[in-house]
Image: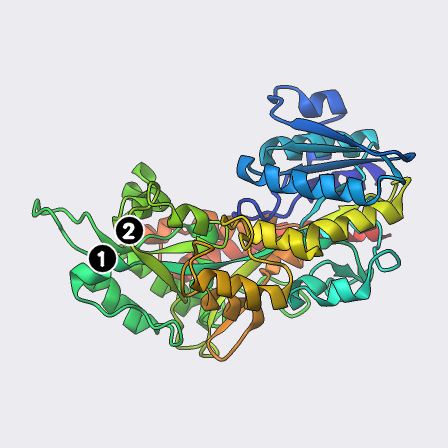
């Protein structure tokens, strides 16, 4: 049983998400496939870099994170500042940074060897497993309540765990960031089609969205083939906002039963979603395989595409995306609550349960997450390049929005769409996916990975849902078994 528990913990190394840079990826049953740390790292390229910052004290911390090259400089400065602020206490801080893929492999090795960094990442979906298996410690006794209360309300909840439920109990991580998927639209294509831009205060209905997509879908070069589409969608991460906006839930309230086969809201929404492709308003499955939706968006071939908060910097770069664009909401389904819904994600800084220096580690976590000057830097207020939105709510609505409005921070002017999703208002709502509340996300994989068969016309929506439900339920049952074995 102990081996099974370790396996489940490693499987939850990082919560499955397409939100690159803000969440971690699942390594399924890693404990079974990597019997020791040598096997865990064999065959991986060493892409990590390590910097040691020294003080005059006795305490040593190992910080292990993944991030992109352009993020490293900012975070290195935060580490340098922290060491200077605590130089009488700190001997050294080893700041190790690597790629997301290699981070997963090294963390498997660390877990297997029982040699954890002092500070590292945890995703919302992994909190339960990490706590149950003794990898991370509660931060309540080590952090300032004012710092906790300054951050987005969602991130005050998603890293809490009471031993049974996520959302209540002790706090186990501080957010690196909070992210979500809004919708981006190409203003140049709207101008060419003579269309009014989407109203950020009134998201399209399903019907209105289809009408706009029809107007944007064109044969621009007259060769008889469509080469511009209303929208491009990615089933793994770009489908659920359409479904959520029609009130869809995949599980029952206590998240023990899959409910897709007899789910009218899902049938309606999935029919709408797959009809976008069947009716030619998105690239076909074959066309999407040849060239993905993201690249078609960058090439100016589609009117709408998903936009994560981490995508904004790339879309604002004229060399990457030489078109005018802005943000809007996902279309609203007829059977939902009238709001546009999307999913949000995060990754958090946590502290190892075996650290020799819990107080110092917790202070560093707070520094990286809630330090005002640090958040000004990462959001672009003082650097001019935004790599994330501020974690501090007042800073986001205040100096950050001012910097966007005056051009200091290159950002989409409709940033209130994202804030609307974060906070929830009359038009927008965002939440974690149900996969973030179950012990792993494997139960959802059969659903999204087979949707292309509906788009191809190989199976009806109704038959697909009836076919996939038993497979989803079997995977969910296994996740529940893993959870029960870990908590006994």
Considering depth in this image, is 252 or 470 the residue closer to the camera? 252
Which of the two residues, 122 or 205, is positioned nearer the viewer here?
A: 122
Measured as percent of width and height from the top left, residue 439 is found at 70, 52
List x then y, in percent, for residue 276: 30, 59
Q: Quadrant of the N terminus?
A: top right
Residue at the image point whose x is 56% and y is 68% from the top: 398
**Considering the numbered disc 2 on the image, is that residue within a helix, a strand or a loop?**
loop
Circles 1, 2 touching at the beta carbon (< 8 Å):
yes
The tag earlier along the polypeptide, 1 or 2, is 1
Q: Is 271 drawn above or below residue 8 in the view shown?
A: below
Instruction: Classify mark 2: residues with Cα within 10 Å, few (<14), some (14-19) or many (20+).
Output: some
The residue positioned 60% from the left and 21% from the top of the image is 45
> How many numbered circles does the render carry?
2
Q: Which mark is residue 255?
A: none
Instruction: Tell me, yes or no, if residue 385 can be seen here.
Output: yes
Q: Is residue 378 above or below residue 34?
A: below
Residue 323, disc: 2
Q: Which residue is mark 1?
A: 189
Q: What is the quadrant of residue 376 in the picture?
A: bottom right
């Amino acid at each position: 049983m102990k081996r099974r528990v370790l396996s489940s913990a490693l499987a939850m190394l990082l919560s499955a998400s397409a939100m690159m840079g803000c969440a971690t990826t699942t390594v399924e049953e890693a404990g079974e496939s990597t019997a020791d740390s040598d096997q865990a790292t064999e065959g991986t390229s060493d892409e990590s870099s390590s910097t040691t910052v020294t003080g005059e004290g006795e305490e040593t911390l190992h910080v292990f994170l993944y991030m992109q090259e352009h993020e490293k400089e900012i975070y290195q400065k935060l580490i340098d500042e922290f060491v200077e602020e605590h130089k009488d206490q700190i001997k050294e801080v080893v700041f190790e940074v690597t790629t997301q893929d290699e981070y997963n492999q090294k963390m498997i090795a660390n877990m297997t060897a029982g040699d954890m960094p002092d500070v590292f990442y945890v995703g919302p979906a992994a909190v339960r497993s990490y706590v149950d298996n003794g990898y991370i410690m509660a931060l309540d006794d080590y952090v300032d309540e004012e710092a906790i209360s300054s951050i987005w309300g969602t991130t005050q909840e998603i890293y809490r765990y009471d031993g049974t439920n996520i959302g209540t109990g002790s706090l186990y991580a501080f957010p690196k960031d909070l992210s979500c998927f809004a919708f981006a639209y190409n203003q140049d294509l709207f101008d060419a089609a003579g269309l009014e831009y989407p109203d950020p205060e009134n998201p399209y209905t399903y019907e209105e969205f289809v009408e706009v997509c029809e107007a944007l879908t064109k044969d621009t070069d007259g060769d008889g083939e469509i080469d511009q589409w209303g929208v491009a969608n990615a089933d793994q991460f770009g489908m659920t906002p359409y479904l959520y906006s029609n009130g869809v839930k995949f599980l029952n309230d206590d998240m023990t039963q899959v409910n897709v086969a007899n789910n009218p809201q899902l049938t309606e929404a999935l029919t709408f979603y797959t009809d976008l492709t069947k009716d030619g308003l998105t690239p076909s499955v074959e066309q999407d395989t040849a060239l993905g939706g993201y690249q078609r968006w960058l090439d100016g071939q589609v009117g709408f595409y998903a936009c994560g908060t981490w995508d904004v910097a790339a879309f604002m770069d004229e060399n990457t995306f030489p078109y005018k664009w802005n943000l809007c909401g996902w279309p609203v389904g007829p059977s939902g609550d009238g709001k546009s819904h999307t999913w949000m994600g995060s990754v958090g800084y946590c502290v190892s349960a075996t650290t020799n220096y819990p107080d110092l580690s917790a202070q560093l976590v707070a520094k990286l997450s809630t330090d005002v000057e640090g958040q000004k830097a990462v959001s672009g207020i003082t650097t001019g390049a935004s790599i994330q939105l501020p974690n501090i709510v007042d800073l986001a609505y205040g100096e950050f929005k001012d910097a966007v409005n005056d051009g200091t921070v290159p950002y989409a002017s409709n940033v209130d769409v994202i804030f609307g999703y974060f906070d929830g208002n009359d038009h927008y709502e965002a939440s974690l996916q149900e996969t973030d509340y179950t012990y792993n996300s494997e139960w959802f994989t059969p659903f999204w990975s087979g949707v292309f068969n509906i788009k191809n016309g190989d199976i009806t929506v109704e038959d697909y849902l009836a076919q996939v439900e038993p497979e989803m339920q079997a995977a969910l049952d296994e996740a529940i078994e893993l959870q029960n074995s870990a908590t006994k």
